[in-house]
Every structure is written in C-alpha cells, then in structure tokens.
Image (cartoon, coloured by chain):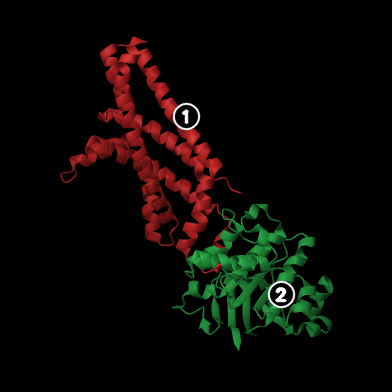
Amino acid sequence: MTMIDVKNLKKSFGKLEVLKDITVEIKEKEVVCVIGASGSGKSTFLRCLNRLEDITDGHVIIDGQDITANDANINIIRQEVGMVFQQFNLFPHKTVIENIILAPMKARGITKDEATKTARELLAKVGLAEKADSYPGSLSGGQKQRVAIARALAMNPKVMLFDEPTSALDPEMVGDVLEVMKQLAKEGMTMVVVTHEMGFAREVSDRVLFIDEGLIAEQNVPDELFNNPQNERTQAFLSKVL
Amino acid sequence: MDVIIDALPYLWEGLKVTVYIFVIAIILGFIIGLIMALLRLSPIKILNWIAKIFIDAIRGTPILVQLFFIYFGLNALEFISLDRETAGIITVAVNAGAYFAEIIRAGIQSMDKGQTEAARSLGLTSTQNMRYIILPQAFRRMLPTFTNQAIISLKDTSLLSVIGIADLTQQGQIAIAATFKAFEIWLVVGVMYFIMIYLLSLLSSFLERRFELR
C-alpha cells in the first residue's frame, strides 16, 4: 500500500526553483533515505511532506489524503506525520515528559494520565526513563534527540520524517540516536530520513534517493546505489562522501 | 516632623488612589498590548494597519496631550461622559498598551522559528502554538522590559493630578496648601513613589527567578 505519494512536486523560493519536479511513491513500512549535497533540495523535499513549506505546484498525498488540497485540514494530517529536526526543537520551558504529552493532550484530546503513561513507555524505549522530569537544557544532544523522537512517536504517527537527525550531534552521541531509529524501522514504521550517515542508509534503508539540483537523479536499493551508481552525479557525490 | 505626621493621612489617601489607578491601568494596558501585538503580527493586512496606526499615534504624542484629549476632548462630544478617574485610567492604560504592544511583538518575533515548526509538525494549531509554546517563553524574556514600562506608567500616573484626580501628587499639593511646607512634603511624596517603584522591581526580580529559563 502506498503511504506517501508525491506527484510532480515543485517548490520555489521567489525566483529560486529548489524542487523542479519530484515524483516518488513510498510504501507503507518502507524506510527511505534521502541523500545529496547541501543545497540540493533534500531538506526542502522533506519539509514539503508535512507542508512546513508551502508547495508551489504538484501533489503530496499522505495515506490517501491530499495535503495540498484547499480543503485539507493540515493540523489533522500533521498528527499522522511525525517530524524530527536537526536542532531537536524541544520546548525549553517544559520538562521532558511535558514536551511529550502536550500534543497528545491538546491535539488528540487524550487524558493526561493516559498521555503520561504512553510517554513513560516511549521514554523507556529510547532509554531515558529517568529523565522524565528533567528540563531539556540539562540533557546532552543525543538525549535531546531521543526525547524529540519520543515526542513525535507519542502522537502515534503513520509516518516519521527525519531531517538530518544526527548532524548536530557530537560523534559519540550519534550511535544512540541511530540505534533508536533502527529499532523503529524494525517495528515497521514508514520512515523518510534525510541523512549524511551513509552507513545508516546502507544498513537500514529499503531504498535510497539521491537528490541533485531539485530532481531525483537516481534511486535504488542501497547496495546497488552505493556499489554501482549509474548516474555521473551520484558517482561524483559518493566519491566525496564515502 | 509634626508637619509630616499631620500630612500623612492626606498622602495616604493619595497613595491609595495612585496604586488603584496604576494596578487597573497596567492590567488593562497589558491586555491592550497583547491584543495589539497579535494584530500587528496577524497575516491580515487591515488588522495589521489598525495596530500600527494605534501604536504610532500613541507613541507619537505626549501623554499629557492624550490625557487632555480623552478627558476634555472626548467629553466635549455629546454622547460621551467620562469621569476623571475613568479618563485617567484609560489614558495610562492606552499609553502603556502601545509600548507593551511593541515589547510583546518584538518578544514573539525573537523566538526561534524551530519552536513553531516543532509545535505545528505535532499537529498543534497556530493558536495552541502561541498559547503553549511561544507566549510562555516570550513572556519570560520580556519580563525586565515589562518592569521598565510598568515603572514608567506608575510615574505617569502623577500627571493625572492636573485634571484633579486625588492621587499622591495631588494630595501632596493639598497638604502643602494646608501646611506651607513644600520641602518636607515633596520629599515625603518622592520617597513614597520611590518605595512603590522599589517594590515593583523586587517583584520583577522575584518573578524572573521564579520563571527562569532553564
């Protein structure tokens, strides 16, 4: 079943055309990594999937709902699409547990007791059960990112988007975050991950998209794409990063 | 010394009026400021303009002129009748409101865009984002600037004596008329304002510590 259906997606910032024409289907439970040079449009592509960026042209259909339609209720759709940011974006004035239960309570209308119970389970899952009452300011980068993942999961989304989730982390923190993401992939979450972690892309993803100058220049299963890239631009990019 | 003790009941009455007017005006002013700041940031052009004209008009005119306009000017219209205290409260509230509006607007705009993105990506509406994420953080940052404006507004209330409101300044004048001791009375009046403002800054530092950003 198709979970994310992107049809002829175009996105411009003023005169600058960042996404030129992107069409891609992502199936339920599929893990797709998006790679490419900085400025290639890969983050913009991800941010169009939950309309954090207004879409200039084309369609994005999430689980059968066209998020670009005029009558689309974007708040309802976003509840089904979790997002994890490079800079974590935890709410600094709220404790870890408050960060996690806010949206389930306010957007989904779940009771505080129930939301807290789920939040504690998720914190245990990301290995931070003892940090429930800490403030984000007292956590390390890796811990913050794991809280951010738990916060997104608390909405019980159908899709998770990751925007360079490990790029702002100290190298020794990266492993913990990737471990949580691997676990999530194993449980069958549909994931789209913009990343520079080629090891993660190779090991965990079902498919890798290489975005170059606003287009998908090449896509394939990771083994093929990394070992036998067809496109010149892919070859050039991989020779620099691998 | 006797002079001061004799004058104290007058001054005490004035002090109560000053505090009463200040408290009501500052609360109203804050509400006006919050509404104007949100209008100012609204994507709807016309609301934007209303707030901008209001803020510019108030900041661009002296408070004494505003007081005269509201008390004498508006009262000259047949269908409006404002008593002194109401006119005084409105003047201080509206004046503080314009400054609060700019403080709040700047505070909201200084927030990291990532906070809004995180809130919206979780499915919170823009109103919920404002209420639970942006305003609570922005208010903490704004607290020192709020205090500044509150102090200015408290001092502005002394201008209300010119339309005959029996505030601390007016009661000081009355006490002098009765005792002819200008030096002593104005000194005591000054000390009373100073104490009020000092208490205000203590309250502010207490709140700042209480709501310290972690």
Q: Residue at image x 53%, y 73%?
A: A79
**Which chain is tinted red?**
B
- Residue that protrudes farthest toward the bottom in the picture: A1
Q: Residue at image x 31%, y 39%?
A: B89
The front one of B150 and B52 is B150
Marks 2 & 1, CB-CB < 8 Å contact: no
Give the numbered dot on residue B119: none
Quadrant where the N terminus of chain A is found in the figure: bottom right
Residue A40 placed where, x, y %?
A: 69, 72
Residue A83 found in image quarter: bottom right
Callout 1: SS: helix
- Residue neighbourhood size for the residue with mark 2, other residues' Cα within 10 Å, grouped as few (<14), some (14–19), many (≥20): some
**Which chain is tinted green?**
A
Which circle, 2 or 1, is nearer the viewer?
2
Amino acid at circle 2:
Gln
Residue B141 placed where, x, y %?
A: 54, 46
Give the labeled residue for mark 1.
B198
Give the labeled residue for mark 2.
A183
Residue B57 found in image quarter: top left
Q: Residue at image x 42%, y 29%?
A: B196
Q: Chain of mark 1?
A: B
